[in-house]
Image: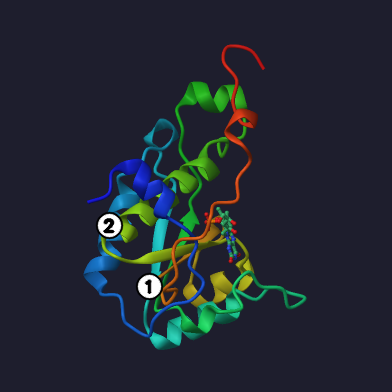
Amino acid sequence: MMNFMELVQARESCRSYQDKPVTREQLVNIVEAGRLSPSGCNAQPWKFLVIDEPEAKAKLCDALVVEGGSTGCPWRASVPAFIALVEQPAKVMPAVEAYYGDTQRFAQGDIGMAAMNMCYEAMEQGLSTCVLGLNDQKKMEQYFGIPEGYTVRMVLAVGYSAEDSEPRKKVRKPLEEVYSFNQW
Ligand SMILES: Cc1cc2nc3c(=O)[nH]c(=O)nc-3n(C[C@H](O)[C@H](O)[C@H](O)COP(=O)(O)O)c2cc1C
């Protein structure tokens, strides 16, 4: 059993998956970890669209290519399941709304928190993930009936890793560069 920092060290984006299905129970467990995440004013501005059937996956794979042909996921055909993290308009407390005007101030951060919880729950179940930021919103709405006003912020690729090598060395800014105490 890994302790938390070992888990953090071991998590990495997986871009090559085994041809092995992920069960609905596993996928719902991942969603549950998202559902339990914190959010500003507990607004829970999310819905998780799980995509695990061939026809729906084909549509999603098409929506992962945006106008102009760019995609963050050239290896998408090998992914057993996806979970789209869809941001809903957040309902926040009146004082927050009065201050920020834009009540969606917290929503992207909330989605990010949910995504992280979901990645670690996937790991707990022996699965790997990759967050995908690029998608064609119009196609997502059209293919999956996502209502207007909702934004597909990320798509999580989920499956059993086919990368059998050791975890990659993390490429990160040095620790000393990313923090200071008490003053900038
Ligand atoms: C919001 C977001 C969007 C991302 N989009 C993509 C993507 O489209 N394609 C991809 O291969 N990786 C994507 N990634 C993964 C990052 O490239 C990866 O997290 C980063 O390089 C650090 O590597 P690691 O996750 O293996 O530690 C995304 C990550 C985040 C958080």
Judge whether 111 appears above or below 175 on screen.
below
- At 43% from the left and 49% from the top, the residue drawn is 9
What type is the residue that disc 1 sits on?
Gly
Q: CA distance from mark 1 to mark 2?
A: 12 Å
Q: Is residue 149 left or right of residue 159?
A: right
Residue 125: x %, y % from top left: 26, 62
Location of mark 2 (residue): 124
Q: Secondary structure at mark 2?
A: helix
Q: Secondary structure at mark 1?
A: strand
Residue 145: x %, y % from top left: 48, 71
- At 40% from the left and 73% from the top, the residue drawn is 161
Q: Residue furthest top?
A: 182
Q: Residues within 10 Å of mark 1 (few under 14, many from 20)?
A: many
Q: Residues within 10 Å of mark 2 (few under 14, many from 20)?
A: some
Q: Quadrant of residue 21?
A: bottom left
Q: Are marks 1 and 2 in contact (CB under 8 Å)?
A: no
Whichever of callouts 1 and 2 sits on the residue coming sooner in the sequence is 2
What type is the residue that disc 2 sits on?
Glu
Location of mark 1 (residue): 159
Q: Is residue 44 left or right of residue 75?
A: left
- At 35% from the left and 49% from the top, the residue drawn is 7
Q: Nearer the viewer, residue 136 or 122?
A: 122
Judge whether 143 appears above or below 155 on screen.
below
Q: Residue furthest right?
A: 68
Quadrant location, ligand no. 1 = bottom right
Which of the numbered marks, if any, corresponds to residue 88? none
